[in-house]
């Protein structure tokens, strides 16, 4: 390895694009990881490349099967299906690092043999002491290289005592420069990087080592990931160089911050994709929204499906700055998707949010009708629980003084009596007729009692739903059906 400045020359432009998303199963799929997955997916789609899922579970203590399943389910729910991965297999598997533990030591040994790495017998206590001294001297910590020049005898002696070495990469000092696809040219002074561990003393690889070996063996051409990994990139490039392997192109995405500019966390709202889904966000809206965190459509039209985004996607146009996660904008966008979604599909998605009610009360077409007439103002499916309630549960008029006041009003009683008298003869299959008859009722009370049209409607709505606002009145009457309407009018008149 030469010690001068060198700009890393990355992979051959003619290689077929291969990208990967490499989550660690130490938590549910984070919305930020979903965005990284999406950008990889879009890049693969745009370039006719391949998109790989690799599970990075080398840290067995922090990894769990439940989180792994959550990652699978969330990516699938978002439609970010992978071409190769732990479940679907592929040419370069296994795709779970814990199933690749036999691969890493061979490459570590190769680096030792070539003089790029060495065994380190320092204990945690030794290293803690070094850290402490650096802290006292107020200098950045770098490993002392205490074990760099141990002789074979010294190493054998330590091993005979049962001390298992870790393996450290020997970092040469130089200026390392690479062109980041998103951030442009980046320079690093490698003299600031201490010799870092590539294998732990327990025989498992560190993240920086496993990721390079896997990306190399899986023929990954572009590593697109969050900028929180930027400080790892020089270490990884040094390993590629030492291995004599082609170096992928790197693209580091800006971070996603909360509206208050701090790290997005649970106190701001949901952060895991599965939690967003539980709250009633549609996966289409979530995907569309995260695509806009760092990318802008060329025609300025923000509502777009994944195929449209992929067609318009250019990786070098991704913004290098951080993005703000505006929950309010997501809510707005979700509302847009709720309103334009096919009603049958939306009803399927809505059912788990309203299954506390006796859904069997209605036929499927009626249920779809309920969703159709209640979806307009909502931004989250979870809001349906409240908004459809009166279709399933009789109103409790005593819950609100406002409702009681309307129903106790003499004029309201006159409206309800006349409506009750007439509704018995309504044709409930005839939307137009109900519409016209309500119009006649409004005119009648305007002429006779001087009631404003909305006062007449308030009385009826309040009696039928126990609320002053809600779905279209004609539709509400049709859906409730004649018997229920009559029953509720009688109850309201008793107030
Ligand atoms: N396992 C790493 C993470 O979840 C992936 C880093 C990478 O993409 O290289 O952050």
Image (cartoon, rainbow, N blue to C red):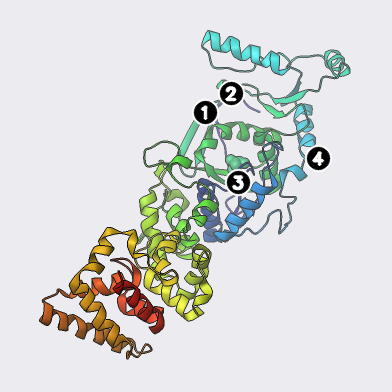
From where the camera sits, is residue 255 visible? no
- SS class, disc 1: strand
Q: Residues within 10 Å of mark 3 (few under 14, many from 20)?
A: some
* Residue depicted at 28% across the width and 87% down the height: 422
Question: Residue 215 placed where, x, y %?
Answer: 66, 44
* Residue 341 figure quarter: bottom left
Q: Residues within 10 Å of mark 4 (few under 14, many from 20)?
A: few
Q: CA distance from mark 2 to mark 3?
A: 25 Å
Mark sitting earlier along the chain (4/3): 3
- Is 137 rendered above or below residue 121? above
Residue 399 vs residue 87: left or right?
left
- Is 178 rendered above or below residue 418? above
- SS class, disc 4: loop
Q: Nearer the viewer, mark 1 or mark 4?
A: 4
Question: Residue 294 placed where, x, y %?
Answer: 42, 48
Mark sitting earlier along the chain (1/3): 3
Q: Quadrant of the N terminus?
A: top right
From where the camera sits, is residue 69 visible? yes
Question: Between 50 and 469, which is closer to the camera in this rendering?
Answer: 469
Q: Which residue is mark 2?
A: 193
Q: CA distance from mark 2 to mark 1?
A: 9 Å
* Residue depicted at 83% across the width and 16% down the height: 155
Q: Which residue is mark 4?
A: 102
Q: CA distance from mark 2 to mark 4?
A: 28 Å
Q: Which residue is mark 3?
A: 11
Tag 1 and tag 3, C-beta contact below 8 Å: no
Question: Between 490 and 310, which is closer to the camera in this rendering?
Answer: 490
Question: Residue 33 placed where, x, y %?
Answer: 54, 47
Q: Nearer the viewer, mark 2 or mark 4?
A: 4
Question: Between 460 and 185, which is closer to the camera in this rendering?
Answer: 460
Q: State ligand 1's quadrant.
A: top right
């Amino acid at each position: 390895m030469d010690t001068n400045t060198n700009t890393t020359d990355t992979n051959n432009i003619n290689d077929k694009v291969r990208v990967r998303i490499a989550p660690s199963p130490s938590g549910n799929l984070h919305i930020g990881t979903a965005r990284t997955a999406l950008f990889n997916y879009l890049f693969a789609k745009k370039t006719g490349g391949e998109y790989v899922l690799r599970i990075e579970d080398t840290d067995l203590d922090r990894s769990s099967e439940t989180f792994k399943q959550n990652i699978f389910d969330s990516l699938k729910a978002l439609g970010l299906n992978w071409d190769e991965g732990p479940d679907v297999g592929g040419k370069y598997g296994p795709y779970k690092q814990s199933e690749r533990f036999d691969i890493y030591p061979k490459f570590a040994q190769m680096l030792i043999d070539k003089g790029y790495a060495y065994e380190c017998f320092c204990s945690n206590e030794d290293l803690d002491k070094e850290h402490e001294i650096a802290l006292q001297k107020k200098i950045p910590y770098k490993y002392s290289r205490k074990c760099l020049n141990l002789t074979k005898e010294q190493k054998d002696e330590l091993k005979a005592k049962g001390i298992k070495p870790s393996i450290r990469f020997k970092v040469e000092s130089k200026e390392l420069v690479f062109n980041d696809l998103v951030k442009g040219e980046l320079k690093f002074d490698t003299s600031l990087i201490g010799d870092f561990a590539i294998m732990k003393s327990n025989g498992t690889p560190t993240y920086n080592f496993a990721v390079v070996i896997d990306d190399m063996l899986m023929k990954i051409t572009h590593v697109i990931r969050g900028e929180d990994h930027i400080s790892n990139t020089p270490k990884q490039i040094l390993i590629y160089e030492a291995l004599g392997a082609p170096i992928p192109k790197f693209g580091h995405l800006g971070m996603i911050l909360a509206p208050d500019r701090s790290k997005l966390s649970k106190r701001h709202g949901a952060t895991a994709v599965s939690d967003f889904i539980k709250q009633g966000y549609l996966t289409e809206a979530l995907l569309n929204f995260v695509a806009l965190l760092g990318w802008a459509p060329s025609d300025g039209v923000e509502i777009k499906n994944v195929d449209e985004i992929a067609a318009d996607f250019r990786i070098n146009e991704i913004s290098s700055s951080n993005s703000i996660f505006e929950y309010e904008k997501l809510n707005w966008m979700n509302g847009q998707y709720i309103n334009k979604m096919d009603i049958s599909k939306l009803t399927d998605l809505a059912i788990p949010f309203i299954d506390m009610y006796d859904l069997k009360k209605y036929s499927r077409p009626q249920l779809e009708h309920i969703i159709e007439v209640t979806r307009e103002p909502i931004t989250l499916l979870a809001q349906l629980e409240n908004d459809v309630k009166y279709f399933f549960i009789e109103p409790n008029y005593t819950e609100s003084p406002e409702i009681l006041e309307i129903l106790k009003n003499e004029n309201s009683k006159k409206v309800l009596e006349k409506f009750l008298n007439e509704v018995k003869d309504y044709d409930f299959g005839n939307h137009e007729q109900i519409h016209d008859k309500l119009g006649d009722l409004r005119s009648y009370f305007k002429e006779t009692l001087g009631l404003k049209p909305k006062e007449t409607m308030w009385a009826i709505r309040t009696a039928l739903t126990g609320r002053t606002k809600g779905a279209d009145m004609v539709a509400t009457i049709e859906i409730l059906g004649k018997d229920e309407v009559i029953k509720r009018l009688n109850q309201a008149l008793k107030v």
